[in-house]
Amino acid sequence: MRFYEFLGIFIVIALIPLSMAGESFGEKKARQQRELKSAQLAQQVLDKAEREYLSYRFGTQTFEILRNRKKGITISSYCGDNLEDFQKKKECQALSKLAQADLRPFTSKDFDGGRNPGSVVCTKQLDGQVIYATDSRGNVQTFCHFKDGSMLRSDSIDYFASKKIPPEAKEIEENVDIKKMDAVLDANEESEKGN
């Protein structure tokens, strides 16, 4: 449990009186208002826990990035995280390109050597450039940088691109050793060339 979630729950519990028997109308109304305020405060705390603004360094410049854990998106803060905001999509390529991200056209060979799927989709499908950014703790992350200057973290691209794969295909993929399957297909291609 994150600290913010704990704090929100604590605030709600702390402000609810243990005994409500014998309340007057005014006391009941006052208690309900306190409960409402504490619930609103708890929701604000939880919203803050799922949405946070981070600073990343790209070369010598520092940019503010918005991360929404619940939606699985880490994007330039000025783009916002409302995926249905069509006006923002016009102003922010990172937001509009995210809808185009799709892993289906790729094969396992595109990811040889452990290549990051989000980075592959960035360069080969979304016409972006992969850049490396450093957060305040010194951790390096990959981002897809678009011509308008907006950025989207590679794992966000991977997350949204993989959502387009039908569940039955994911199930098959989990049960099949892709490297063995590729080796069999390559061997079949070689034998066909020899015939």
Image (cartoon, helix red, strand yellow):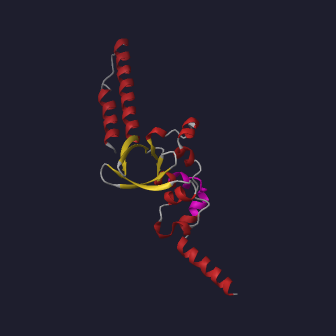
84 sits to left or right of 70: right
Q: Residue at x 31, y 31 (%)?
A: 11
Nearest the viewer among 95 and 187 is 95
Q: Is residue 72 visible?
A: no
90 sits to left or right of 14: right
Q: Quadrant of the N terminus?
A: top left
Number of labels in the image equals 0
Quarter of the view holding residue 184: bottom right
Nearest the viewer among 127 and 107 is 127
Q: Residue furthest right?
A: 195
Q: Position of residue 52 (x, y in %)?
A: 38, 41
Q: Is residue 162 magenta?
A: yes
Q: Residue at x 59, y 53 (%)?
A: 164
| Above or below 144: residue 175 | below
* Prevailing secondary structure of the magenta residues: helix
Magenta highlight range? 159-171
Q: Quadrant of the C terminus?
A: bottom right
Q: Is residue 57 magenta?
A: no
| Above or below 192: residue 130 | above
Q: Position of residue 53 (x, y in %)?
A: 38, 41
Nearest the viewer among 65 and 46 is 65
Q: Residue at x 38, y 37 (%)?
A: 48
Q: Position of residue 49 (x, y in %)?
A: 37, 40
Q: Residue at x 47, y 54 (%)?
A: 154
Nearest the viewer among 170 and 190 is 190
